[in-house]
Image: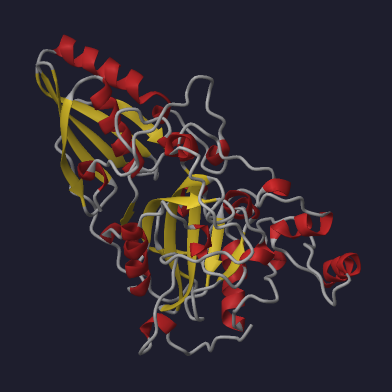
Amino acid sequence: GKKASRTARPLHMQAGGSQAGPSSREEPAGRPSGKKASVPMEEELRGRSWATPPDRVSGRKRDGAELARCSGFWSAEGERAEAAASGSAAGERPSKSPRRDGETALVHPRAELDDLQRGLVRQFVSTIDANEESIVITNPRAQGNPIVWVTRPWQDMCGFTYGEAVGRNPRLTQGERSDPAVVAAISGALQQERPCKAAMVNYRGGEGGPAFWNMLSISPLLHRGQLQLYIANLQDYSYHMGQMVSLTPSQFCRAALHYRRGRRLDAPLTSLSLAKPAIYEADGEHPLQPAPEPPPAQPMMRRLGWNKLVLEPEHLADRVGDALSRIDAQYELAERLASGESVVVSARSGDVVMRVLVSEEADGHYSISCARLSGDTFSYHAAFRQLKAALGEALTQHPLQSRGFVTPPTGAARGALPLARALPALTAP
C-alpha cells in the first residue's frame, strides 16, 4: 500500500479529511449481509459463549495455509509455501507463533505503514503477550484508519484472518444492532485523539455472523507527542452480560478525563493495564501527558465488600444495579466521579440505607464496598448477604485473557430483555 508520510498530519486533522475509526459501518466484501430475522435477540446475545473454532469462524473450511496465516506473522519461506499451494505469485505464512518479542512482529505486506510506524508496531508488540491479548492496531495517518496488525485472539474473536482484515477499518465487525450513538461517540473521540472505552454489539465475521458484546478500550500511540497509531484492546463480555437478570445491558462510550494518563512502553503490559485506556508515548525521553488529578478521598467509615475484581467498573456498576433490583431494593446513581474509575450508588432495602461504591484500587484492580448509612446492624448484614448472592460470579476473578469464551454453567442462560431498554443512570458517559 501507499506509505504515509512521517511528517504528514493525521488525515482527520487535514482540511476536508475525516476520521474513519471504528465509527461507521461497512458492508464486508464477500461476506453475507442478510439479517437473521428468525433468530430472537435473546438467543443471539444472551447466555452463549460465542466460541468459534478457527476453521469455522467465517462459515467455511480453511486450508492449512490459510489457517497458518491467523497469527499475522510473515516470512519469505511461508510466502513460497502458500504460493506453491495456491498457484499464486506470492503467499503468506507465519514464521513462528506470536511471542513477547518485537523481532517476530512482522507486518503484512499490504499494511499501510511508514518505517517509523513499523518500528512502533514492533516496539508495542514486544510489550504484550500476543498469544493471549485481543489487540488490533490501526493507522490514523492513512486514509480510512486501516487495520495494520492484529493478534491471533483478535482473529478468533472477530472472525477475520489478518490477511482478510489488513487495510480495512475496524468497523468491519459492526452490524444492525451496533448502536449508532456509540459509533458516533467513538468517532468523536478519535477525531480529538482521545482515548476512550466502549461497550457495543459486534458481529463475528461481519454483519450476518454471530453477535457478541465487545468491551473495547482504544488508546493513541504517540511518538514525541505526535499521533502515529491507535491501539484497541477487545474483551468478549457476552457471558458476563448474560448474567444480568433485571436490567438490560446498554451500549456506551466514555472518553473520561482520567483515560488521558500517559504511559510508556518500557515494561510488559498486563491484561489489566491494556483494558485501561491511556495515551502511550513511544519515545522514552519525551514528556508524558500530565497525569489527571486523583479522585477525591472517600470519607472514612466501616465498610463491607469485595476487592481484587477484574471486571470493568462500568459493568460492575450495572451488575450492582441488577443485583439491587433482584433483592427488591430501591437505588439510584448518586455520583460518577469523573477523575477516576469510581461509581457511587445509594440504595435502600427495607429500613436499611447504604452506599455502594465501585472503585479502582491502587494496584489497578477494582472493588465493591458497602457502607451502612442508617438501619440496624442485623438488617444491614442480611441485606449485604442478599447482595452478595445476587452478584454471584461478578465477585470472582476472571482472567482477562480467557474470559471471553467461558462456557456458561448449566442453567445460567436466561432470556434477555429488549436491547432498547437501558438504565441511563448506570451507563451514561
* Residue 425 seen in the current view: yes
Residue at x 69%, y 71% (from the top left corner): 108
Name the colouring of the figure: secondary structure
Picture quadrant of residue 324:
top left
* Residue 301 seen in the current view: no
Q: Position of residue 155 (x, y in %)?
A: 63, 54
Q: Position of residue 239 (x, y in %)?
A: 48, 35
Left or right of 249? Residue 79 is: right
Q: Residue furthest right?
A: 84
Residue at x 56%, y 40% (from the top left corner): 50
Left or right of 263? Residue 161 is: right
Q: Does residue 38 lie above or below 26 as drawn?
A: above
Q: Position of residue 99 (x, y in %)?
A: 69, 55
Left or right of 296? Residue 240 is: right
Picture quadrant of residue 148:
bottom right
Q: Residue furthest top?
A: 378
Q: Residue furthest front?
A: 38
Q: Does residue 283 lie above or below 205 as drawn?
A: below
Closer to the camera in the image, 303 or 213: 213
Q: Does residue 334 lie above or below 148 as drawn?
A: above
Q: How many numbered marks, from 0 up?
A: 0
Left or right of 381? Residue 29 is: right
In the rendered image, the quadrant that contains the N terminus is bottom right
Q: Position of residue 37 (x, y in %)?
A: 48, 45
Q: Does residue 177 lie above or below 279 as drawn?
A: above
